[in-house]
Image (spheres, helix red, strand yellow):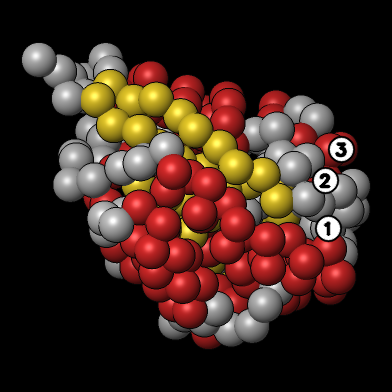
Amino acid sequence: MTDSYRVGMIVPSSNTTMETEIPAMLRAREEVRPERFTFHSSRMRMQHVTPEQLASMDADSLRCAAELADARVDVMAYACLVAIMSQGLGYHCESEPKLARIAKEESGVDIPVLSSAGALTEGLAHLGVKNIAVVTPYMKPLTATVCEYIEHQGFTVVDSLSLEVANNLEVGRLDPQNLIEHAKRVDTSGADALVISACVQMPSLPVLDILQQQFDIPVVSAAAATTWRLLNSLGLDPVIPRAGALLAP
């Protein structure tokens, strides 16, 4: 019998991308591996990417962890990168154990918990890169926060591009095909890797493989890094076709 895993996602209420891209990647994995997955979400209220709404949303993540524990998910992903990064440097190291503790209290079992923030920096470390170029949908001050967070984890951000879209629904409506041109606007000449979407709400999966073929450095996204970390947490091979360097078979 084929193994099946329940994937729990804690997502902002206005997020429309993670429940599209993570399932799409794991469905593509079914081409090369036997495991199957179901997907289960709990939502935190957030409409605009502001410090106030991000802080309120992060506090709500505890409720979400308890709800997903009720479903006995096999792994839980805090699928909002900036909600973590805006709460302080290295905050994923505090948030992930806190959510895991809540999940165990509610379910009586250990449920692995990961975050997109932690997954991105862990994935970059796994690739052995140091200098990073970053594309974000955020306003410039929030992009600066994200870059500072990444640098605190031991990397150097050599250049960043801010698309300056404040409304989270509008971020989810951005055309991923435009990332092909945005990748030309960000300076990758001194970069060891390109983070083409440092935001799990900005769609990128349709062009991730295209961009990887255009660059001789790893191209990753926050969503791909989340999926990579999710598979590692389950003890499964982190291989997915057409999803960038981090998940390359």
Q: Nearer the viewer, residue 135 or 109?
A: 109
In contact (CB < 8 Å): disc 1 and disc 2? yes
State the separation of the CA atoms marked 1 and 3. 11 Å
> Label 2 belongs to which residue?
168
State the separation of the CA atoms marked 2 and 3. 5 Å
Q: Residue at x 61, y 68 (%)?
A: 84
Q: Nearer the viewer, residue 189 or 22?
A: 22
Q: Could you classify mark 1 by the number of other residues whose Cα lies within 10 Å: few (under 14), some (14-19), or many (20 or more)?
A: some
Earlier sequence position, callout 1 versus callout 3: 1
Answer left or right for 74 relative to 43. left
> Label 1 belongs to which residue?
49
Earlier sequence position, callout 1 versus callout 2: 1
* Residue 64 percent coordinates (x, y): 58, 52
188 is higher (above) or lower (below) than 30: below
Q: Amino acid at mark 1?
A: Val
Answer left or right for 41 relative to 137. left
Answer left or right for 169 relative to 154. right
> Label 3 belongs to which residue?
170
Image quadrant of residue 189?
A: bottom right
For the N terminus, give its image quadrant: top left
Q: Nearer the viewer, residue 31 or 41?
A: 41
Labelled disc at residue 10: none
Q: Residue at x 70, y 27 (%)?
A: 177
Image quadrant of residue 81?
A: bottom right
* Residue 233 percent coordinates (x, y): 27, 52
Q: Secondary structure at mark 2?
A: helix
Image quadrant of residue 121?
A: bottom left
Q: Amino acid at mark 2?
A: Asn
In contact (CB < 8 Å): disc 2 and disc 3? yes
For the C terminus, give its image quadrant: top left
